[in-house]
Amino acid sequence: MAPASFSHSRQPAEEQMSEPQVYVVDDDAALRHALTFLLSSRNVKTSTFPSGEAFLEIFSPELRGCVLTDIRMDGISGLELFSRLTDAGSRLPCIVLTGHGDVPMAVEALKNGVRDFIEKPFDANNLVDKLIVAMADDLERAEQDAARRNFAERMITLSDREQDVMQHLIAGKLNKVIAEELAIAVRTVEVHRARIFEKMGVRSAVELVNLIASMGELPAPPNRKSG
Amino acid sequence: MAVDTHPRIRGLQASDDSSWPRALSAPALMLGSLLSLAGIFCVLGLLLWLLDGDEREARREEIIRDALWVEHTIQFRFGAIETRLARLAYELGRADSPEDVFAVQSGPLVQIDREIWSLTWLDNNQHVMAAIPHAHDAQTPLDPVVRRAVEIAQRGGRGSFTPPYSRPGTSDHVSYVAPILKGGRVSGVLHAEVSLGRLLAQHIPWWIAEKRAVLIKRADERIAASRSKIDPDKAALSYTVEIGPPLTNLWLTLASYQNRSSLVQNGLVVAMIVLSFLAAGALIARERQLRGRKRAEADRDREYAFRRSMEESLRVGIRARDLTGRLLYVNQAFCRMVGYSEAELIGRTPPMPYWVPEELERTQRLHDAVLSGEAVGHGLEVKFQRPDGSQIDVLLYEAPLIDEQGQQQGWMGSVLDISDRKRSEELARAHADKMQHTSRLVTMGEMASFLAHDLNQPLAAIRSYQTGLKNMLSTGSMNSDDVTPVLDAIGKSVERAGLMIRRVHNFVKKSEPRLEPLDLAEVTKETTALLEPELKRALCSVVIELDPALPRVRADRVLIQQVIVNLIRNSLDASKDLPPNQRRVTLTGSLGSGVIEVRVRDRGHGVPEHLRPQLFSPFVSTKAGGMGMGLTICRSIIELHGGGIKYEGQADGACFIFTLPTTG
C-alpha cells in the first residue's frame, strides 16, 4: 500500500497511548488520514495503524478508548483482529467499518461481541458520536473493573469467621442473633463486624450491602428486621 | 400330362419344393425308390431265370439231337463195317485164290474205314492166314470175347460183334467176326478189330466235338473211349443213350462243356446285382446328400433370417451400391432414416431421392469421391432429406464391397443419424456464445459490485474530510493552514475514485473485438488491479513475472483481460483450502517462436485426471455449482486470436498455459 501523504506517528509515545483515544486500523492510508482529521475536528485523540498486526504489536490491556477497524484489510481481517484482541485480554469496544455487501459478516461480528458496525460510506459525525460514547463506556467499564478488582482484593483479606459473620450481617441480623447462631460472644461479633467494615472500606452495614449488590456477587435481600 | 402324372418326376419336384404335402416327404420317397428298384431287380431276375430255363431246354434238345446223331453215326459205321466184312468173307469163300483177294480188297477197306485197327484172316484152327495192316498187328492170343465170337462164327456160320474189350495202350476195341463160307462150310473167319477211340476220332464232326464231350461207356460205366477236351464230370448238361444193336453193352454219353453263354449270363446276373446295389447305394447316398443339403439350406435360411433381423434391428443404416452407384441393398434403419421404402430405393441411381436439393452438387461430388475410392475410411457428413421435407444429418462411412473372389462389387456404406448430436452441438455452441456474453455480464456485475465497494473508500474519506471541515467551521477553530492539505487530500480521493470508475468502464465498454498491439505485462498488471479487491478478499496474492521488454501481441485488450480474470479466478477458487500464505498465483511470460507463452500457475487442488481431456468443453467444472463455461470461453477467445490454451498438471497445483502470436 502506498504510504499516506501525511500521517500521525504509527508508534505514539507511551504516555500518549495510555490516554483514552480511538485506535484507527485501516489499510487505506487516505481513509486513515481522513478519519484522523475528522476525529481531531471533534477533539478526539487518535492513533492509526495500517494493519491489524501493527496494532496487536503495541496492544496492552491498559489501553483505554475504542477500536475502529476496517473489516477487510491486507493481512488479518478486522474480525480476526477483534478476536485476537479479546484473546489478549482486551475489553476495548470495537466498531467495525464495513463495505457494501459485508452485512452478513458484520452480523456475525456483532454476535461475537463487536460493539457496532458502520457501513461505508458513513455519516461521519454519527460515527464520531458512536466512537465518543464507546470511549466513555470503556472508561466507565474500566472504573467498574477497578472497583471490582478492589472489592475482590478486600474480600480475600477476610478470614473464614469474618466471612460467616458478614453473611449474617448482609442478611440484616442483629449482633445478638448472630452471636447466638454462631455460638460466640456478642462482643466477639462486634469485633468481627468492626474488622469487616475496616477491611471492606465501608462505614455501615448499609454501605456494605450496597457494595456487594453493585458487585453482584452475593445476594443481599434487605432485612427489615434490622431497622 | 405324362410328365405331370409321372411319379418320379413328381417325386423329384417334391424334393425340391417344400410346399408339397408331407405324404411325399423324403423318407417315403426314399422307400418308394428302393422298393421300385427291388421290383426291377426281381423282374429282371425272373426274366433271366425264364430265359435260362428256355435255353436249358433248347440246349437239352440240342444235346439229345447230337447224341442221337452220334449214336446213329456209330451204328451206321458198324453197319458199314459189318456189310463190308461180310462181303469180303463172301469173296474169300468163293475165290480160287483167296490170298489174292484178301491182299487186293483188304487194303482199301482198311484205308476207308480207318477205325479198323486190324483185319485178320483166321483158319478154323485160328491160325492167322493173313493180317492187315501188319501181320504182327494180328491179335494173339485172341481175347476171350473174340474167341467166343469166332466160335459163334465157326459153329453158327454167322457174323457177330463182340462186346467191348480192353486193349493195352489204347481205347477199348470192339471186334466183328465174320465166317468165311466155302462150299457151305466154314473155312475160316475174318476178324476186324475196331478201335472205338479211332471211331470217335474219325466220325465225330468238329462242330460236335467243339462243344461236347463224347464218351462211350460200357454197361459197367467204365469209359471205353472218349473224345473230350475236359473232364466231362463237370459238364453242366449231359445225355446218355444206348448204342443199339448190333452192338451191345455200349452207351454213348454226350456232355456239354460249360458254355460261354452261361458265363455271360452269370456275368449279367452278377452285374445286375452289383448295379442294383450300386443304384440303391447311390439312391441312399443321394438321399443323404439331399438331407444334408436341406439341413444346410435350413441352416442357411436361419442364418439369413438372423442376419436379416440383425440388420433390420440395427440403428445404423446400411446400404450397398454397385460400382456405378446403383443401390443394391438397404436395411430398414436406412429406410427409416430417409423415409423411403426399400422397394422405392433398390435399383435407384444417383441423384437419389433423399438428396437435399440445395446440396445436390455437393452430394454428387461426395458421391463421386466415394465411387472413385477417395473417401474411404473417414466419415463424411451429409444431409439427407425425407419425403416430408425434413432433413437429417448423417455420417457416412464407405468401404469397398468385396465378394468371395476378392473382386470389388461395389460400395458398402454405413449411415449414422447424427442429427441429435449435431443439434446438441449447435445448441452447445449457441449456449457457449451466450455463456460468453453472460460471463461477461457476470464479470461486469461483479466488477460493479467491487467498484461500488472500492468506491466507498475514497467516498468515505471525502465524507470524513468534509464533515471534519464542517465541524471545524462550526467551532471556529479552523485556520487556512489546516484546510489546504485537507482539500488536497479530498482532491486525491476524488481522483482515485475517478480512476477506479475509468478502469471498470474500460473493461465493460466493449463492442467487436478490436485487435491492437498489446503489452501483455501491462495488460496483466491492469487486470490484476481490477481484481485487487477480490484478491484481497480471498487473501491471495498475484505475482507477475512478465518482462515489459517482451514483444507485443496482437489482441483485443478486453478479451485478454477476460481470459486472465477467468484464469486467476479459477486459481483463487482452487487455492481456497490452502493456508493464506500459500495462496499465490504466479503469472510468467516467455517468448516462444512467434508467440508469447503465458503461464498461470497456482498451488491449489489442480484438475482431477479424469476431467483433463474435456477440460475445455462446456459444462465441465471442478467447482461445486460451477457452470463450466469459464475455460470454454477462454479457449474460444485465445483461439480467436490464433493462439492456444492448454492445461499442465503440476505436482502441487495447476498451470494453465496460453499462447498469443506476437505482432511481428
Image (cartoon, rainbow, N blue to C red):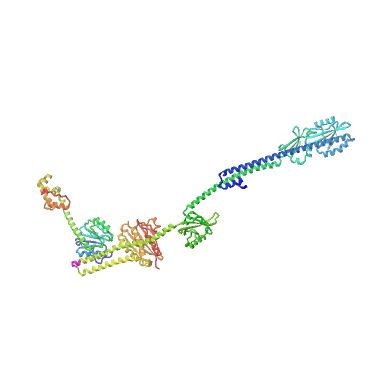
A54 on left or right of B45:
left
Which residues fall within the magenta stretch?
B472-477
Is any part of residue B436 visible from this angle?
yes
User: Dividing the picture into quarters, in which one does residue B510 lie?
Assistant: bottom left
Q: Where is residue A53 in the image (x, y as percent from the top left)?
A: 26, 60
The residue positioned farthest toward the right in the image shown:
B96
Q: In the image shown, does B220 or B383 lie closer to the viewer?
A: B383
The residue positioned farthest toward the front in the image shown:
B1
Q: Where is residue A92 in the image (x, y as percent from the top left)?
A: 21, 58
A69 on left or right of B546:
left
B265 on left or right of B474:
right
Q: In the image shown, does B29 or B568 lie closer to the viewer?
A: B29
Number of marks in picture: 0
Q: In the image shown, does B75 or B166 lie closer to the viewer?
A: B75
- Overall secondary structure of the magenta section: helix
Q: Is residue B476 magenta?
A: yes
Is any part of residue A64 visible from this angle?
no
Q: Is residue A129 magenta?
A: no
